[in-house]
Image (cartoon, rainbow, N blue to C red):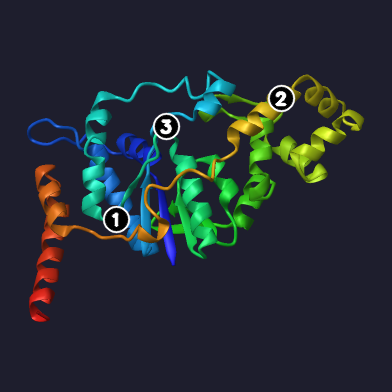
Amino acid sequence: MRLLLVDGSYYAYRSFYAMPALQTSAGAPTNALYGLTVVLRRMLADLRPALAGWAVDDGLCAERVSLCPEYKAHRPEVPEALSVQLDHVEELMAALGVPVLRVAGEEADDVMASYTAAAVEEGMEVVLASNDKDLLALVSSRVSIYQTNGKDFRLLTERDVTEKWGVSPAQIPDLLALIGDSVDNIPGLPGVGKVTAARWLRRYGSLEELLRQAPQASESKLRELTAEQRERILRNRRMVALRTGLPLPIPPEALTVRPDLAKQVELFCRWEFRKLAKEAEEALAAKTGQSELFS
């Protein structure tokens, strides 16, 4: 059974900035809502998941903020034109049939990580739709990352992650502890990029072993940086670690995709998505006709 988990916060911003400035005749902005509708319909068509969830942020992880008060502090405020659209996202997801997943005070990637751990334990296949580097750590024989590629799509596997990053998915948190993550305002070691960090981790196998052997390493840069920045490295490692034990608001097996075509017609007409409204009307008419035929 396939479970699709979508990083809703990422895709909301992506849709807002990728789409032109659409609005209704009354002046209400709708570009993010339109983009979300299109992208989620494509995911469902590409992957045909039996189960799906739309994960959203509900604040920042208190532990990460306590470790680094600057964590994600550089992010700008949500634009007003996007903010007013976010108020309607849950209504849109209900119409498209995808449950919204939110845990009080937690971030979307930790929610996705917790659902992934639970689903894999139950023998499910999991597909993660996100651009978050942290989530690469979850990729395995049962977990892949969804990416569009023009008119096609691909699922990133363990091999794909290793080829791109130079380390296995399980080593991604160790890599990020060394190079940091500018998106989340986590500073890495000065002068250490992906290539160098990956080379060190391939040599020593893990961050723990790297730190243990670094004082005797022949490479002066490794000796000096790990001596000077040891506490930063250990702090970064704690910050990039995904939380997989969060309480799940809905059991994985209950995340059934159940589109509400009548609701889609109502929303798409309200937002003046004429083509989408017509498609939903036709699908609803066909479904109603089938129901009457077999009643």
Q: Which residue is mark 1?
A: 41
Residue 189 can be seen, yes or no: no
Density class for disc 1 (Cα within 10 Å; few <14, some 14-19, many ≥20) is: few
Closer to viewer: mark 2 or mark 3: 3
Report, in whole angstroms, how far the alpha carbon at label 1 lies from the one at label 3.
29 Å
Q: In the drawing, does residue 202 fall left or right of residue 59?
A: right
Element at label 1: helix
Q: Which residue is mark 2?
A: 191
**Residue closest to the eye, 191 or 286:** 286
In the image, what residue occupies the spot 47% across and 20% down?
Answer: 73
Q: The N terminus appears in which quarter of the rendering?
A: bottom left
- The x and y percentages for residue 132 are 50, 40
Which amino acid does the dot numbered 1 rest on? Arg
Q: Which mark is residue 105?
A: 3
Whether pointer 2 and pointer 3 mark residues with C-beta atoms closer than 8 Å, the reply is no
User: Sequence order check: which comes first, mark 1 or mark 2?
Assistant: 1
**Residue closest to the eye, 130 or 38:** 130
Closer to viewer: mark 1 or mark 3: 3
Report, in whole angstroms, how far the alpha carbon at label 1 lies from the one at label 2.
43 Å
In the image, what residue occupies the spot 43% across and 40% down?
Answer: 108
Which amino acid does the dot numbered 2 rest on? Gly
- Quarter of the figure with residue 66: top right
Density class for disc 2 (Cα within 10 Å; few <14, some 14-19, many ≥20) is: few
Element at label 2: loop
